[in-house]
């Protein structure tokens, strides 16, 4: 069964460093998402991406964050200058065209900022 | 605006039933249910698209009351493997899924 894959599975970084989280969505999907989950809390929407541009973003997704689809298969989340409170599990997700289709999540990238 | 889930947590003995509710203050197009085990990604359970739709998978089923803007997840004859946090995600059309805070379900022997 096709799946969303994410790398790295776990990254430890120093405060102030830049981090890039990578995702390979399911190949025929058109909508891509990043969500994050702080330990013990709910899954929070960060950003959605469609047709090579951001279609929606939450208030969490400030200037520190950016997304890119550099080569037609990868979908990346960059955090420019990490803060302690960025420590969380980051989930990439993708969806086929149309409303109501299932959103498939990757296994997540656990980011620890020290 | 995030949906509201209730209860926040529930403890069941194996074989007991549970209902988890999800309600929204906004008109909904779809409701998605996920289960998440500790340290793992959310796993899709089912999606409900139309008001009044009901779906089921083995002993887990759900309903969607479009008028009341709410959905309920029914777990029948619970098994140990049902333990986890259940999230509902709601969407009003092509908007991204917004998740509730989750309901922590613990099934004990």
Image (cartoon, rainbow, N blue to C red):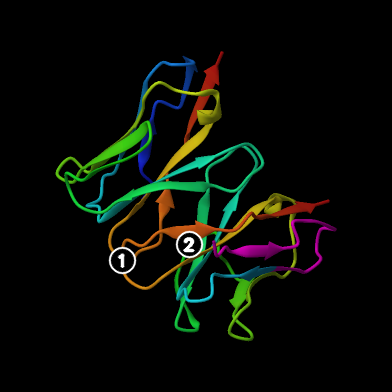
Quick one: label 1, few (<14), some, or many (20+) residues within 10 Å?
some
Q: Are marks 1 and 2 in contact (CB under 8 Å)?
A: no
Viewer-closest of B21 and A85: B21
Q: What are the residue bounds of the magenta stretch?
A: A1-21
Q: Residue B24, position in %: x, y?
A: 29, 44
Regarding mark 1 in the picture, which secondary structure is present there? Answer: loop
Residue A24 covered by magenta stretch: no
- In the rendered view, does A29 fall on the left or right side of B6? right
Q: Is residue A42 visible?
A: yes
Residue drawn at point x = 48 percent, y = 81 percent: A53
Q: Residue A2, position in %: x, y?
A: 55, 65
Q: Residue B35, position in %: x, y?
A: 49, 40
Residue drawn at point x = 45 percent, y = 76 percent: A30
- In the rendered view, does A102 fall on the left or right side of A8? left
Residue B21, numbered label:
none
Residue B54 appears in which quarter of the rendering?
top left
Residue A73 appears in which quarter of the rendering?
bottom right
Residue A12 covered by magenta stretch: yes
Residue A58, numbered label:
2
Q: Quadrant of the C terminus of chain B?
A: top right
Viewer-closest of A4 and B87: A4
What is the tally of numbered marks visible in this picture?
2
Q: Is residue B32 visible?
A: no
- Give me the chain letter of mark 1: A
Residue drawn at point x = 54 percent, y = 61 percent: A1
Task: Name the residue beneath numbered marker 1.
Answer: A99
1 and 2 marks on the same chain: yes
């Amino acid at each position: 069964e096709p799946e969303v894959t994410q790398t790295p599975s776990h990254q430890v970084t120093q405060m102030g460093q830049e981090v890039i989280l990578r995702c390979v969505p399911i190949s025929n999907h058109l909508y891509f998402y990043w969500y994050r989950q702080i330990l013990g809390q709910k899954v929070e929407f960060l950003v959605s991406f469609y047709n090579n541009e951001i279609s929606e973003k939450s208030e969490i997704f400030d200037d520190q964050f950016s997304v890119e689809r550099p080569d037609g298969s990868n979908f990346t989340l960059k955090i420019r200058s990490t803060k302690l409170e960025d420590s969380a599990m980051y989930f990439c997700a993708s969806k086929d065209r149309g409303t109501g289709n299932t959103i498939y999540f990757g296994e997540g990238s656990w980011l620890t900022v020290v | 605006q995030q949906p509201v889930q209730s209860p926040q947590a529930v403890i069941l003995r194996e074989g007991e039933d549970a209902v988890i509710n999800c309600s929204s203050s906004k008109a909904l197009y779809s409701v998605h249910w996920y289960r998440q085990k500790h340290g793992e990604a959310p796993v899709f359970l089912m999606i409900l698209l139309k008001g009044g739709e009901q779906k089921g998978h083995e002993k887990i089923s759900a309903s969607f009351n479009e008028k009341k803007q709410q959905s309920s997840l029914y777990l029948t004859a619970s098994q140990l493997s049902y333990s986890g946090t259940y999230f509902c995600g709601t969407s009003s059309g092509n908007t991204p899924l917004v998740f509730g805070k989750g309901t922590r379900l613990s099934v004990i022997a």
